[in-house]
Image: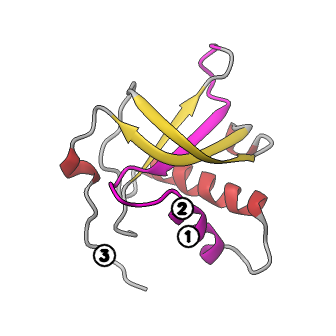
């Protein structure tokens, strides 16, 4: 929808595999991770803070995963890396305790899959 491909992964801090941490970031080369937070500020009510913005980001990632909205690829297991930019406390929202955002790479996706695409909807 926005022309940028974002990645979403979960990470377990203690090895149980429950995924207490949500990881979200742009996969499209040249897109700064701050774009994600800019989108959240634009879509949330005026005068809301980082906590609500983090919940909006988490809701969009969860919705995309659940509904398959604009999904490029879904990997059961992948080798992802995050150059962390910002961390937020979700306090259990969407069954996650923390949200980590930053520049993300996933080895299993191709350059064509993460290239910017022409959005269907324009603002």
Mark 2: secondary structure: helix
Residue at 55 percent of width and 33 percent of height = 10
Across and down, in percent, residue 75 comes to 35, 32
Q: Earlier in the sequence, mark 1 or mark 3?
A: 1
Q: Is residue 93 visible?
A: yes
Residue at 62 percent of width and 13 percent of height = 15
Q: CA distance from mark 1 to mark 3?
A: 17 Å
Across and down, in percent, residue 9 comes to 50, 37
Q: Quadrant of the C terminus?
A: bottom left
Mark 1: secondary structure: helix
Q: Earlier in the sequence, mark 2 or mark 3?
A: 2
Left or right of 19 on screen, residue 118 = left
| Crowd rating for badge 1 (residues with CA inside 10 Å; few <14, some 14–19, many 20+) | some
As drawn, 79 above or below 91: above
Residue at 69 percent of width and 62 percent of height = 53
Left or right of 111 on screen, residue 54 = right
Residue at the disc numbered 2:
36
Q: CA distance from mark 2 to mark 3?
A: 18 Å
Residue at the disc numbered 3:
120
Start-end of magenta stretch: 15-43
Across and down, in percent, residue 80 comes to 42, 32
Work out whether residue 91 or residue 81 is closer to the camera in this orientation and state it: 81
Residue at 60 percent of width and 63 percent of height = 37
Q: CA distance from mark 2 to mark 1?
A: 5 Å
Query: Is the C-beta separation of discs 1 and 3 under 8 Å?
Result: no
Query: Is the C-beta separation of discs 2 and 1 under 8 Å?
Result: yes
Mark 3: secondary structure: loop
Whether 17 is among the magenta residues is yes
Residue at the disc numbered 1:
39
Q: Quadrant of the N terminus?
A: bottom left
Q: Is residue 66 visible?
A: no
């Amino acid at each position: 929808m926005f022309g940028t491909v974002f990645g979403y992964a979960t990470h377990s801090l203690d090895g149980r595999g429950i995924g207490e941490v949500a990881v979200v970031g742009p996969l499209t080369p040249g897109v700064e991770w701050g774009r994600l937070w800019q989108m959240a500020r634009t879509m949330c009510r005026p005068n809301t803070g980082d906590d609500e913005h983090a919940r909006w980001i988490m809701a969009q990632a969860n919705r995309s995963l659940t509904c398959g909205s604009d999904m490029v690829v879904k990997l059961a297991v992948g080798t992802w890396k995050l150059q962390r930019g910002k961390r937020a406390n979700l306090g259990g929202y969407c069954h996650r305790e923390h949200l980590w955002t930053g520049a993300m790479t996933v080895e299993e996706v191709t350059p064509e899959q993460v290239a910017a695409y022409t959005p269907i909807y324009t603002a």
